[in-house]
Image (cartoon, grey):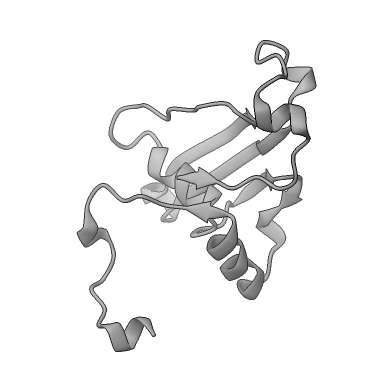
Amino acid sequence: MMIRSGDHSGAARTGEKSMSNQSEKRAVLQAKGLCKGYGSGSGRVEALRDVDLCVYEGELLVILGSSGCGKSTLLNLIGGVDSPDSGILLVDGKNICNLSERELTDYRRNKIGFVFQFFHLLPELTAEELG
């Protein structure tokens, strides 16, 4: 997944800012108290529980963990494919949890990029259906 950042200062574009001082860098992604569960009752699974995350401009992030730990759930929330049960998810300072379906479509079209490991994760469409 790639997040396309908004406007940048010249120093940020050329890498002149110190990468060791996060107070100088702009947060492009912030998750605060993010929770997401699936199912109900005794069968409910909490995929994410109170996740806090901050990713700064220019940082490279790896999301690593065992199967079922919530990696895909987190990426689906960041990508606007799914909505959290609670918490705040800011991308370039905008809470994407409050976006309408139209705004989410624009967000996914203009702000987020996915590279899928397996092509069959998406249903196959004809050129006409993609049109």
Q: Is residue 65 above or below residue 113?
A: above
Number of numbered discs = 0
Q: Is residue 120 above or below residue 70?
A: below
> Residue at the location (46% across, 42% down)?
46
Residue 19: x percent and y percent? 65, 15
Q: Is residue 12 above or below residue 101?
A: above
Q: Which residue is at the front of the view, 105 or 67? A: 105
Residue 127: x percent and y percent? 28, 83
> Residue at the location (63% across, 75% down)?
102
Quadrant occupied by the C terminus: bottom left
Q: Which residue is at the front of the view, 66 or 29? A: 29
Residue 101: x percent and y percent? 61, 73
Using residue 72 as the reference point, say whether residue 53 is left or right of it: right
Residue 29: x percent and y percent? 64, 38
- Which quadrant of the view contains residue 57? top right
Q: Which residue is at the front of the view, 94 or 87? A: 94
Q: Is residue 126 above or below residue 35?
A: below
Q: Residue furthest bottom?
A: 128
> Residue at the location (61% across, 40% down)?
34
Quadrant occupied by the N terminus: top left
- Which quadrant of the view contains residue 99? bottom right
> Residue at the location (61% across, 68% down)?
106
